[in-house]
Image (cartoon, grey):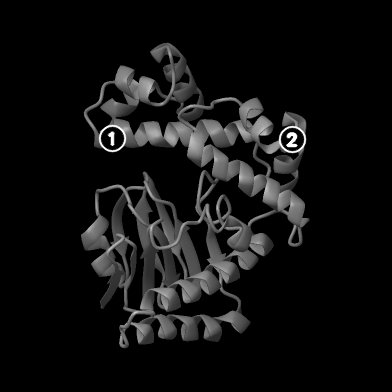
Amino acid sequence: MEYNYQDAMRAHFSILSAKEWQKEVIEKPLSMYTIVVNFGQPMEIQIDFESYVIETNKICCLTPGGYLKSVDCKDENHFIIDFNQMFYCLELHDADLSCNGLLFGALPSLPILDICSSQIQPFRILIESFLAEFQSPDANQGDMLRLLLKRMIIVCVRMAREQLFYSSVPPLEETDLLRSYQALVEKYYKSKHKVFDYAELLFKSPKTLANTFNKLNGHTPLQIIQERIVLEAKRMIYYTDKTIKEISFELGFDEPSHFSRLFKKVTGDSPLKYRSLF
């Protein structure tokens, strides 16, 4: 099963099975925003050096850039939805969706969401609506697919706000601050390495950011920056032949020694030792 929509402006949207998805993206950086919806048996994905189990009736969101190594699925009761920025720009529609930095971006962990019992049937109907739309291609098909995608993302955002934080009903202004920070880190992590830089962009103090993160998920703003830098470094060390010096400069460090110090602080190994493990 694989259904694709593309237009002359290079907008792309597709819905496909995990097996078809794996064929397209294995051992390459994901180029699309991806939503995995699993109605079947638990499935396992390996992405960015970690394995994750997506249980029955769960949804997982993946940000472009991640490297998919494998997909282990037992049946066909799952759906992979992916789209690019040309099809639906999350940053442009942030005021409508509020998903940038919550479902996608520099996140402390992979967002895996439970579909509550009351939402299972509506989600199935939504998937069926996607599939039905591919049976009637016309000039309005792209617009209809965008409407359906927008609905899916909004529902996922509501679930994320209830499930991804310490409090089940956190204040909206606090979750918006956290997700805005994480979206900015995803955008600028190669050039901005200090919490103060992002606090300035958000018109907040570093202390306010620290208090909000501690309250909602127990991480620190600095951890988000450093872990995002190290994740990209791991990708380049493993998947490219770039030298450690080249990697450090690409990630915005004037001195390779500063990069190596950060990498060892986060991983426990120097970049050279990490590369030797593979």
* Label 1: how many Cα within 10 Å (few below 14, some 14–19, many 20+): some
**Taking 62 as reference, is 151 left or right?**
right
Name the residue type under label 1: Tyr
What x and y, as percent, mark residue 136?
32, 87
- CA gap between label 1 and label 2 equals 37 Å
Residue at position x 50%, y 28% from top?
266
In-front residue for pair 54/5: 5
Judging depth in this view, the residue of 85 and 172 nearest the camera is 85
Pick the quarter of the image with the C terminus: top left
- Secondary structure under tag 2 reads loop
Count all numbered tags in the image, as a single digit.
2
Q: Is residue 173 visible?
A: yes
- Please give the label number shown on residue 238: 1
Image height of 233 relative to 25, above or below: above
> Residue 204 shows which numbered tag?
2
Residue 38 seen: no
Q: Secondary structure at mark 1?
A: helix
Q: Residue at x 41, y 78 (%)?
A: 40
Residue at x-position 30% and y-position 30%: 237
| x and y, in percent, of residue 10 in the image | 29, 60
Looking at the image, tell me whether mark 1 or mark 2 is earlier in sequence order: 2
